Amino acid sequence: MGNLSDALIEALKLLLTGDDATWTIIGISFRVSTLAILSAIPPALLTAFLLAHFRFPGRKLLISIFSALMSVPAVVVGLTLFVLLSRHGPLGDWRMLFTQTAMVMGQFLLSFPILVSMALAAFQSVDQRAWETARTLGADPMQAFFTLLHEVRFGLMTALLAGFGRIIAEVGASMMLGGNILNYTRNIPTAIALETSKGNFAQGIALGIVLVLLAFVLNAFLHALSHRNTPQEAV
Amino acid sequence: MSRFRYAFQGITHRYRTRTVISEARITVRDGQFTLLVGDNGAGKTTLLKIMAGLQRPLKAEVLIGEVQRDWRQWRKRLMEDFMYLHQQPYLFDGSVERNLRYTLRVNPQSCHTLEQAIEWADLGSIIDQPAKNLSGGEKQRVAIARAFLRDPKVILLDEPTANLDQASKRRMLELLEKLKGGGMGIVIASHDPDLFLSLQDERLQLRRGRLTNLQPREKIEGVDWINHRRRSPGG
């Protein structure tokens, strides 16, 4: 018990005194996950919009696949990309393994199905009249698309936060694709795993506190958004 | 407003194996008020959406001026010149003012101003209210005010007086009268034909996929169209 309280005090010191190693890890985590989610948003929104507004063969199958991919373990995504990016893999010439770019790619793949599925649900929550109204009022297809984005902005924000929450805390893909290299690819989850295995609980707890705080902040955001999101009128 | 004439010919549309519209012909001119009657499910909404360029027909040709082309070749023009209003208008998230401003933003060439639209449709008392919280009659007035700002050649209204109280119906009629007076072509699908007796120039009936011209206006006066019998001189 004494060890735990000592570790907790030490962890708080690391965070509050601006410990260089700890904050570098936090910075890498946020940089990689932010890049991943930002690069996933445009194609995911477009995919969700197409799935919501167009009927084509295989559409339902695609929706089911994206839904299933939401729960694929991060380590499986990491393994798949590892095989592709490894020296003898088909993308080995890119020499991306154990880089932040590889981590971004892994987190992109993890967040993409979440963004698509949740954005699809948001687009489907607005009936066809929204699109038709925008078009008949004179909006071109691109203007109408952005009008629709505005109409479902709270649902999209929820998707964004859920996707970010998933990738900032995943360990499997980051460990396999980044290699846990100090000051380069070591992020919060991989650092927690490493420091804990070494018996250095203080840094692990400090980083854990950051993840827990982040979870609270994201949930508070989601809660606030769900309250601001006025229910759609009955048709 | 310049003089115009749109002649739709051979409009045919199917839902799976059921033909809902078959070889329909309809002509719209400036300042002309056409009433479209028919049972529920007769295809009135489909016909209006085809005319507005919002729904692709199985087959249709359109004569604009002296040029006859396939519907697909005229679609962009139809979307520019026609405006469709849903039975229950979709108002975008935000205030009434935001809805009007949106119309101006996507129609920068509009010859009307926001202030003119507010005065024209008497929206001053509700201009700051959230659009989604308005009553049915107020929503219809906002939708008509958007049409005023958009200023299309032809406005297509789908059951605009359904579920409105008498006062709201009267206000709607006044606004339509002003639009007609301004030279706008108007086509209305309605189950409330008596309401538009003073305005209508032509009455069409859509029944079993066929569009038939009932009687010209001169012969409509004095007829109880709900019961399809001639009224007594006193009633």
Image (cartoon, rainbow, N blue to C red):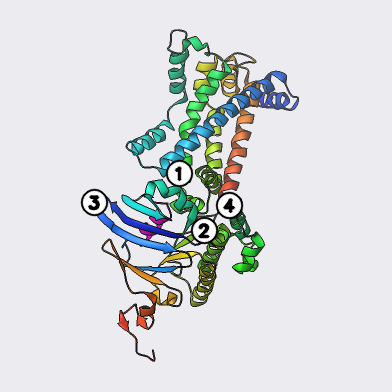
Magenta residues (range): B44-56
Name the spot of residue B79 as percent of width and height, x first: 47, 52
Residue positioned most to the front: B66
Q: Secondary structure at mark 2?
A: loop
Q: Secondary structure at mark 4?
A: loop
Residue positioned most to the right: A17
**CA separation, marks 1 and 4?**
30 Å
C-beta proximity under 8 Å, tags 1 and 2: no
Residue B146 seen in this snapshot: yes
Residue at the disc numbered 2: B152
Q: Is residue B47 magenta?
A: yes
Write down the quadrant of residue B110 in the picture.
bottom right
**CA separation, marks 3 and 4?**
39 Å
Could you tell me the amino acid type at mark 1? Ala
Name the spot of residue A32 as percent of width and height, x first: 59, 24
Query: Going by the image, does A26 lie left or right of B62?
Result: right
Residue at the disc numbered 3: B17
Residue at the disc numbered 4: B107
Magenta segment's dominant SS is helix
Query: Going by the image, does A183 lie left or right of A122?
Result: right
**CA separation, marks 1 and 2?**
34 Å
Nearest to the eye among marks 3 and 1: give it.
3
To the question of a shared chain for discs 3 and 4, the answer is yes
Name the spot of residue A178 as percent of width and height, x first: 55, 16
**CA separation, marks 2 and 3?**
34 Å
